[in-house]
Amino acid sequence: MTQKVPKEAYTYFNEGAIYFKKKRDIANYLICINYLSDIEHRKGHFNKAFDLIWESLPLAHSIENKRPLYKFHQMLGILYGAFGKDSIALTHAKEGLKIAKEHVLKNKESSSSIISSYLDVAVQYVEMQTYKNALNYLDSCYIAQGNNNRLLFVDGVYAITYLKLGNIEKSKTYFRNVLPYLEKQNNGFQTSISFHIAELKDELKQNDSAIYYYKKSLKAIDSIEYNIKLKPKVLEALADTYSKTNQNFEAYKSMQAAKSISDSLFHAQSELNKHLFEIKNNYKEALKKKEEQLIAQNKILTANKSASSRLKLLIGALLLFIVISLIAIKQRNKMKQMAYTREKNNAILELKNKELTANALQIIEKETSVKELLKSIEEENPKKFKILSRKHKQSNKKLWDDFHLRFTQINNTFYDKLLELHPDLTATDLKHCALIKLNFDSKEMSHLLGISINSVHMARSRIRKKLNLKRNENLTSYLALVN
């Protein structure tokens, strides 16, 4: 459809844009906009082509599907190139290639988008006469394809590049089969290929063949209304070839036609597009106008303000400053008070924990003494030992319960925060964590909990796993930070 005559193609893609906009299919809507811009460019309406892309560019940036975005950059590269802004054109072509690569990789699409993007960059390098870089990007087209099938569009640009480098034989080889294929497809690229084959014939001093292919290029430009900006260049080259063969009248007519088309296409058009191709797009112009309006309004307001209104403004600003200062002072004092209270509470907490620890150590000492007494009673009176041992265990449990109650009262948020961070901790795990927080060693914990030292070590290891601590992370340091 893109190769149809512009009127038919424009109607098709314009209807498509309206349809997809109603369906809220933004990606396909933007693809239609890109084709509309290309059609305007083909007709030589560069201003309209540029407007279509630039107005839709923010929308292309906003959607996840980046296919329209890389096509927009390709089109901007073509448009800037038409007015000789080669560095800007190359920037857009390369940006289009970058986005196309990311899009294809993310969506696992075919490499055709990457190939066309490589080709765009290569064409821009040809325009800039940087032929070595052009050849590198053309090679990349075949690398991206990954098979031995011929890419006739790429071969066409290879042929043009080698022609510019003066390698006539390679140029002839690459031109072979390209033009018949493009004519069969009714593709607009035939306009350029016919022109460059004519240049090749000129190099070979085959003037009649050169004239034939120049006319072929002109016929294609007129019939499919494509690549109109090339027409003045073709006519100038044709005039030169006519001159070589002493067909002076034909040369004069061709040169006159070239001048007329060039004037209508570029002279007047360049005036219309001047702000566009100096990177002054419509958005920047609109913003600039708004800024100018605001500045003008501010100047009028400033000129009309009386001394009394300025004084009121000054007093208002002063009052506002005083209020803000008072709020800031009040807030700072509040923060100082909060910090003081926090420090005071931390100090009290630390003192109470020290008292609790000292109390627990006294219990451990008594526990050791009681165990020694029970051991001596066990040898003399086993029956009495059993009775006293049972009472001791009950008493020991009560002591632990009292200790646990006091710890909870002093460190009232410790268990809550610990369980919030690690909900799979058991009641036994929490007892161990409390003693570890108070810096009890394994032996002291063994006495308090009535278990072996080995059991304490196993419990610590189990807790470390539940807390997801690494080998180099200290359990005591971690629990000390939980308040």
Image (cartoon, rainbow, N blue to C red):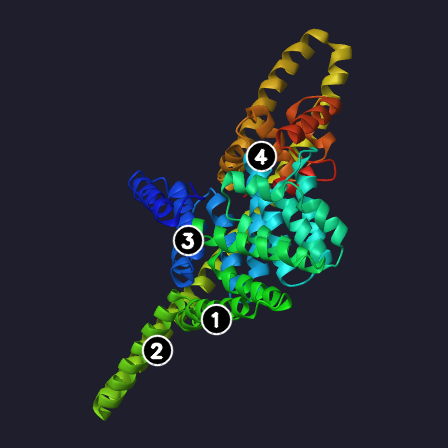
On residue 110, the disc is: 4
Label 3, label 1: how far apart the Cα atoms are: 30 Å
Mark 4 belongs to which amino acid? Ser
Crowdedness of circle 3 by 10 Å Cα count: few (<14), some, many (20+)? many
- Residue under pointer 1: 256
The reply to whether dot 2 and dot 3 touch (C-beta < 8 Å) is no
* Separation of marks 4 and 3 at Cα, in angstroms: 25 Å
Q: What residue type is labelled 2?
A: Phe
Quick one: label 2 or label 3, which is nearer the N terminus? Answer: 3
- Counting from the top left corner in percent of width and height, residue 296 is at 29, 82
Q: Rounded to the nearest whole Å, what is the CA distance between mark 4 and mark 1?
A: 47 Å
Asked if residue 138 shows in the view, the reply is yes
Tell which tag, 4 or 2, sits nearer the viewer.
4
Q: Judge the density around disc 4: few (<14), some (14-19), many (≥20) Cα neighbours within 10 Å.
A: few
The number of callouts visible is 4
Identify the mark at residue 321; answer none if there is no mark.
Answer: 2
Q: Which amino acid does label 3 sit on?
A: Ser
